[in-house]
Image (cartoon, rainbow, N blue to C red):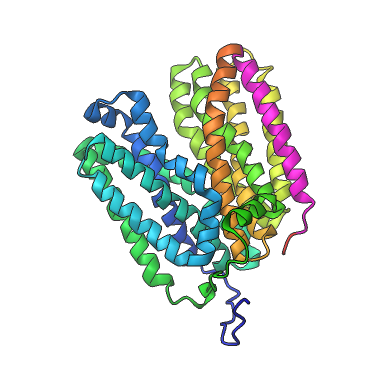
């Protein structure tokens, strides 16, 4: 039976903005587990002499864990406790970065990258669950929009400070500084949140059914599945757009500009979606609007010939709409979930589907572009948008909890 103690504290109906921002920073520190290797890719190639495929595998190793264990992570977090999982994941990430700062053998580096996947997954499952709990209902979609920017912000910060640290002090300093950062935010959150009455969430300890059967129930739960499907087709597309579209631009200066500007536009779209979902419409409708916007921009792209400026402008609008998808998908989960456990499972499934999309999307887009050029890109984007619209409409038929 669930604990229904009369001593359970009343939930404070105010958004705890400082704690929300600290949890967002924790997400940034976890996303830097991807970004730190991305910005130091050439330096790692030079140091380890393992070739681009092996070094690239070290970059993607973090995501493999999320692909395999996404759903089970949400279930485990609901049993162990979200704050324990979050702090443990951050401290694990710090320890692994400290090991990496010694520049061990490539085999040891690869193992630490695999283990970082558990750290990253623990953060992306527990942190948004805690943010939702610390947010008043009138701010929940907005705080989810803020949370959704953590990945883009991490890459922007690493591209700025990380490159500087790498250039001045080398690989060891880059990994060491990340270890200090992620450990520090873990310690701060432990002391800041451990006695917070709002987070007095009773872990789910009973095992009414087998673990595998419970996992299948998560996949069959539309409150968790549909936001994850909406998110899946975003991750299929964004990384590919950011990677391959600049290569379609002939102007070298515009190509360089787009490499910097497009990630920032995507991050702006994510925050914008959270604000719209909070104050103007349901997150399901925001996702629907976003996918329709992406499709419209893709159609316009197919009619632009010879104008690099207009091409870049339309791509920018397309990426803005595309960036709105994760903000709306993240806002759907606390809107549709009936309890914190269901929220954590939703975020776990979101992480799993996100890694699936990031794995399947780039080779699919690379093949389409290599065979058919811009026409292949537009056709694949339109296909993705059809599925995105479908799952957004299905999610809109579910009655929310607020």
Residue at horizontal 49 percent and vertical 64 percent from the top:
82
Kindly tell me whether residue 81 is visible in this rendering: no
**Up/down of 12 relative to 301, above or below:** below
Q: Is residue 262 left or right of residue 333?
A: left
Give x and y (percent) for residue 145.
58, 52
* Range shown magenta: 372-399
Q: Is residue 18 above or below residue 232?
A: below
Picture residue at 69% right of the left edge, 54% below the top: 223
Q: Nearer the viewer, residue 257 or 339?
A: 339
x, y percentage for residue 397? 80, 51
Q: Residue at x 59, y 32 (%)?
A: 237
The residue at the far right in this view is 397
Does residue 73 sit above or below 51 in this rendering? below
Query: Is 104 on the left-hand or right-hand side of 341?
Result: left
Where is residue 181? Give x, y as percent.
31, 54
User: Whole-percent x and y of residue 160?
Assistant: 35, 40
Q: Quadrant of the C terminus?
A: bottom right
């Amino acid at each position: 039976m669930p604990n229904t103690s009369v001593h359970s504290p009343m939930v404070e109906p105010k958004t705890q903005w400082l704690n929300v921002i600290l949890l967002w920073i924790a997400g940034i520190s976890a996303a830097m587990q991807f970004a730190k290797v991305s910005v130091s890719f050439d330096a790692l190639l030079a140091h380890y002499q393992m070739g681009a495929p092996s070094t690239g595998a070290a970059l993607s190793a973090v995501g493999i864990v999320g692909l395999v264990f996404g759903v089970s992570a949400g279930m485990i977090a609901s049993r162990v406790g979200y704050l324990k999982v979050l702090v443990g994941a951050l401290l694990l990430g710090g320890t692994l970065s400290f090991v990496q700062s010694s520049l061990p053998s490539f085999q040891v580096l690869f193992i630490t990258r695999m283990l970082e996947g558990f750290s990253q997954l623990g953060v992306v499952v527990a942190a948004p669950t805690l943010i939702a709990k610390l947010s008043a209902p009138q701010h929940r979609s907005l705080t989810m929009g803020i949370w959704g920017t953590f990945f883009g912000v991490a890459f922007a910060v690493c591209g700025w400070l990380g490159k500087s640290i790498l250039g001045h002090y080398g690989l060891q300093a880059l990994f060491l500084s990340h270890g200090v950062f992620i450990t520090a935010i873990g310690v701060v959150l432990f002391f800041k949140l451990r006695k917070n009455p709002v987070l007095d969430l009773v872990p789910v300890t009973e095992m009414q059914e087998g673990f595998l059967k419970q996992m299948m129930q998560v996949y069959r739960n539309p409150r968790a599945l549909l936001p994850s499907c909406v998110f899946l087709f975003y991750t299929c597309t964004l990384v590919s757009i950011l990677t391959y579209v600049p290569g379609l631009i002939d102007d070298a200066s515009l190509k360089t500009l787009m490499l910097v500007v497009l990630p920032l536009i995507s991050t702006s779209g994510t925050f914008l979606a959270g604000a719209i979902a909070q104050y103007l419409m349901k997150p399901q409708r925001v996702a629907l609007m976003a996918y329709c916007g992406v499709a419209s921009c893709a159609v316009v792209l197919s009619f632009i010939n010879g104008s690099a400026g207009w091409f870049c402008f339309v791509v920018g609008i397309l990426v803005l709409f595309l960036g709105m998808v994760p903000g709306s998908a993240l806002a759907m989960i606390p809107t549709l979930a009936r309890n914190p456990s269901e929220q954590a499972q939703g975020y776990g499934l979101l992480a799993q589907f996100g890694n699936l999309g990031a794995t399947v999307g780039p080779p699919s887009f690379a093949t389409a572009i290599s065979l058919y050029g811009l026409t292949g890109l537009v056709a694949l984007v339109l296909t993705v948008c059809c599925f995105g619209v479908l799952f957004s409409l299905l999610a809109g038929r579910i009655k929310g909890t607020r």
